[in-house]
Amino acid sequence: MVDWHPRRLASGTEWTMSVPGQPEPIAVIRRLRFEGRSVFRAVTWAPTSAGRELIGYYRSGDGAAVAVWRHYLAERDERHDRASRTHGGRERG
């Protein structure tokens, strides 16, 4: 069994998650204090906060990392599906 977790892709104080081989991070996770407890907010990565989209709020950093990974896989699959349905700008039947 491999001892691996999506949170291993996170680094820094405002954690960025990166996929090996990709030039840019896929998300940012930040720990916030809310009513005396830690909460982790995950957003998609963009150079500025204005371009980021909320993925969600989580009770743990591990939960946030798993959600980011699932979001990344879903987005990747959706892009692949869209690309496979078109060819040269025309819809395939």
Image (spheres, rainbow, N blue to C red):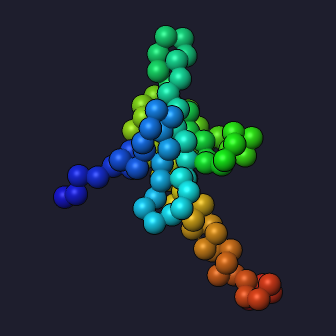
Image location (x, y in percent) of residue 79 = 64, 69
Image: 10 above or below 88: above
Residue 78 appears anywhere in the view: yes
Instruction: Pick the residue in front: 64 or 12.
Output: 12
Q: Residue at x 60, y 60 (%)?
A: 75
Q: Residue pushed farthest top?
A: 36
Q: Residue at x 43, y 44 (%)?
A: 10
Residue 74 appears anywhere in the view: no
Q: Residue at x 39, y 44 (%)?
A: 7
Q: Residue pushed farthest left?
A: 1
Image location (x, y in percent) of residue 40 = 50, 30
Image: 33 above or below 79: above
Image: 1 above or below 6: below
Q: Residue pushed farthest right?
A: 90
Q: Is residue 8 left or right of residue 16?
A: left
Image location (x, y in percent) of residue 47 = 66, 47
